[in-house]
Amino acid sequence: MWAELEALQRRIKAVDQQMMQRARDRLDDLTKPQGSLGMLEQEIIRLSGVMGKVIPEIRSPAAVIYAADHGVAAEDVSAYGPEVTEEMVVNLCMGSAVSSVIARNQGVRLMVVDVGVRSVVRHPGAVVHKVANGTQNFTQGPAMSMTELRSAVQVGIDTAHALVDDGHDLLVTGEMGIGNTTAATALAACLLERPVAELVGRGTGIGQTQMARKQSVIERAIQQNAPDPNSPLDCMAKLGGFEIAALAGTIMAAASRQVPVLLDGLMTGVAALWAVRLNPRVADYLFASHVSAEPAHRAVLEALGLRPLLNLGLRLGEGSGGLLALPLLQNACRVMAETATFTDARVTNPHRKAVPAPNIEQSAGVDKPPVPLDFSEEERAAVYKAILARRDIRVFLPDKIPDDVLGRILSAGHHGPSVGYMQPWNFIVIDDRSTLQRLQEVVERERVAAAEHYRDLKRDYYLRLKVEGLLQAPLTLCVTNDSTRGGPHVLGRNTIPETDLMSTACAIENMWLAARAEGVAMGWVSIYRKEDVRSILRIPDHVDPVALLTVGYTPHFPDIPVLERVGWGRRLPFDSVVYFNAWEQTRNEG
Ligand SMILES: Cc1cc2ncn([C@H]3O[C@H](COP(=O)(O)O)[C@@H](O)[C@H]3O)c2cc1C
Ligand SMILES: O=C(O)c1cccnc1
């Protein structure tokens, strides 16, 4: 074996058994009779092991179809001529082949790779990594040289890595190549050491006579080439095809990246068998979408120990079965994620094992979080950056805020948390100058009135603070709170009546953070009488204007809060606000 392939083999890890056990436990705790999802349960558990997540997710699957021609097509073993390979590649690229339609219907990316079509593919959409213009006719010698085999496998490896690098988390495999059921059956016969007669099938739909010829062509090829069944490389070079070798490369590379592979029919199955012969660990990464009408396919799946998800009598290839079965796996993942557990739903579970209380001591200090982080390091940093860089701003530039930016900020507010999902807020966008002028007047009146609360120097100091930017900012938001929303019995508001206000405050903070990330400044003005604002904005009596938020660009976001800079207040020490287990108790007490 060549060095790159050996290195790849070393990166293929065993699937995570511990994760599989956790997945099994969760499946048994979902509100359904145990085992009632049939073989989907085994597959979901395996997906957990492959992906290393209790709750596996298939967010971005991709399908890759390798196309190549076969010298043996000259022996009249297919119902179609070899020119159809290239024609179908064009059809696939144009979105008009069966698989293109199914992929499009599900929003799945479909990549078509020419790894050895005998003529130039007349479509720019095909990725071209041609190893040669088709294989040699293997009734007369080996289908390909070792160098060609290596190149074809490498195309599959590189393509898989590129797809995984692009964020794809499951690969559906497929192929196109007139004559390839002949090559795949020959390979299967050789690897499984079974008589050709038991494995040969009708391919694209040949009749009895042609099938007899196909069988004898395969038998002759095996006799003539005498491949060593114990050497997968020898078998593939003598009897295989470029697309089958590329498929095998993709399968192994995907396994090395912990990415599951959804197999299609005979050709992908044989490629998988070959990969598993090189490295048995690969088997756990494979999912069989269906069992095709080809007898060899059934035999290959049995040898791989795989149970097909579907049995529809498909005999198409080009990834069609994989694409059809994909939603089954995706739905299984969703079920795992979203079905209530017996405990959560308070449904009686006769199988309930006594679940030991989680041992916090034991799980403390683990370096890996129990669930996968779905924020990258950069994304996490961005969240904290927005929180720490947020400032209450009172100085604005007159420039308008683009509608899309404002829309995102408002939507962030509307996605705020609210008690009992009551969403008590409304957002009134005010950019009418005369309305802003009237708001400014009532704010100014209260600002001066509030000075009464301070004496002497502190009063002068207070009056010098700039507390609003109503006339400077291009717009002001009035955030209102309707405590009647959600009816008289809001979930979670039995004993704390002001939960509506708390919710609205959360919406405001969301907008504040979103605005900061957009480079937009916000100032929360709260010096006004509610009845004044109600009357100016025609707000009904039962609705509270909770905040006036001035919004606009600012020349500068200060590093420290303005009130801290001018000496009005300072941030309390962190330790002074965090207690452990009881009021005023520090970490080491108690
Ligand atoms: C129009 C057309 C579309 C196809 N899509 C997949 N195959 C399938 O049939 C071929 C294998 O069958 P055989 O060994 O009998 O040639 C492969 O190209 C396979 O992908 C097709 C075949 C045809 C004719
Ligand atoms: O099993 C398959 O995938 C298959 C069968 C016939 C023709 N093409 C593909």
Image (cartoon, rainbow, N blue to C red):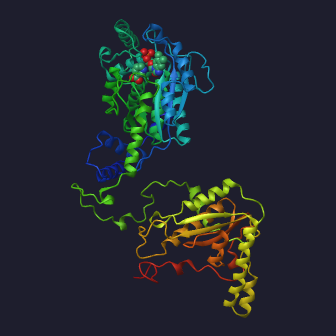
Horizontally, is 586 left or right of 407 in the view? left
Q: Residue at x 44, y 8 (%)?
A: 76
| Residue 376 appears in the figure | yes
Q: How many marks?
A: 0
Q: Is residue 208 above or below residue 194?
A: above
Location of residue 504 (image quadrant): bottom right
Q: Nearer the viewer, residue 341 or 294?
A: 341
Residue at image coords 30%, 54%: 29
Q: Ligand 2 sits in which quadrant?
A: top left
- Which picture quadrant has residue 446? bottom right
Vertical placement of residue 520 versus 50, above or below: below
Looking at the picture, does residue 346 appear above or below residue 447?
A: above
Q: Is residue 400 left or right of residue 217?
A: right
Q: Give the residue at the far right of this rendering.
A: 398
Most extreme residue toward the top, as rendered?
209
Q: Is residue 14 visible?
A: no
Q: Position of residue 127 (x, y in %)?
A: 59, 28
Q: Position of residue 181 (x, y in %)?
A: 41, 18
Q: Nearer the viewer, residue 369 or 529?
A: 529
Looking at the picture, how far across and down is residue 330, in whole percent? 42, 42
